Amino acid sequence: QPQLVESGGGLVQPGGSLRLSCAASGSIFSIYRMDWYRQAPEKQRELVASSTSGTNTNYADSVQGRFTISRDNAKNTVYLQMNSLKPEDTAVYYCNVEGTYYSSSYGKLEDFGSWGQGTQVTVSS
């Protein structure tokens, strides 16, 4: 099963910017979609931004116009550029990737869906 490694979280003042990265590795053959979710304390995990095959992207209303999802297909990496950050953006951010990979156990392509380990984003003065 492919693994995801996230980076880029941290503490930022309101109005500031951060860029998150999520790199997928592990015999990946193709990627269907790459998403960013977030989970604030005592709240459910919510979808923030998604990128499907090609150039389709979608955003939660709360981040539309402030966040931008992008991907580097050659590196199997997805990014989340977050601008004009607000205190309510404070959460643990997770990436999720779905696609196919070569399974050495089964000797064929298999579907996968993997989550990153999460990275904390704190927006505070």
Image (cartoon, grey):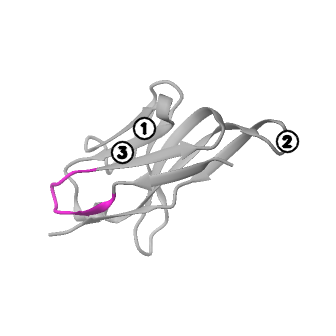
Q: Which residue is found at the position 22% from the left and 47% from the top?
A: 83
Give the percent coordinates (x, y) of residue 8.
Answer: 34, 54
The nearer-to-camera label among 3 and 2 is 2
At mark 1, the secondary structure is strand
The residues tagged by marks 3 and 2 sit, at their Cα atoms, a distance apart of: 34 Å
Q: Which residue is mark 2?
A: 106
Amino acid at dot 1: Asn
Amino acid at dot 3: Leu
Badge 1 or badge 2: first in the primary sequence: 1
Q: Residues within 10 Å of mark 2 (few under 14, many from 20)?
A: few
Badge 3 or badge 2: first in the primary sequence: 3
At mark 2, the secondary structure is loop
Q: Judge from the rendering whether residue 57 lies leftward or rightward of residue 104; answer left or right.
A: left
In the depicted structure, whether residue 18 falls above or below residue 59: below
The residues tagged by marks 1 and 2 sit, at their Cα atoms, a distance apart of: 34 Å
The nearer-to-camera label among 1 and 2 is 2
The residues tagged by marks 3 and 1 sit, at their Cα atoms, a distance apart of: 12 Å
Q: Which residue is mark 1?
A: 58
Q: Out of 28 and 49, give the one closest to the viewer.
A: 28
In the depicted structure, whether residue 114 falls above or below residue 59: below
Q: Judge from the rendering whether residue 3 lies leftward or rightward of residue 90; answer left or right.
A: right
Badge 3 or badge 1: first in the primary sequence: 1
In the depicted structure, whether residue 28 falls above or below residue 42: above
At mark 3, the secondary structure is strand
Q: Which residue is mark 3?
A: 80
Q: Residues within 10 Å of mark 3 (few under 14, many from 20)?
A: many
Q: Which residues are magenta?
A: 9-18
Give the percent coordinates (x, y) of residue 71.
Answer: 43, 34
Amino acid at dot 2: Tyr
Quarter of the C terminus within the rendering: bottom left
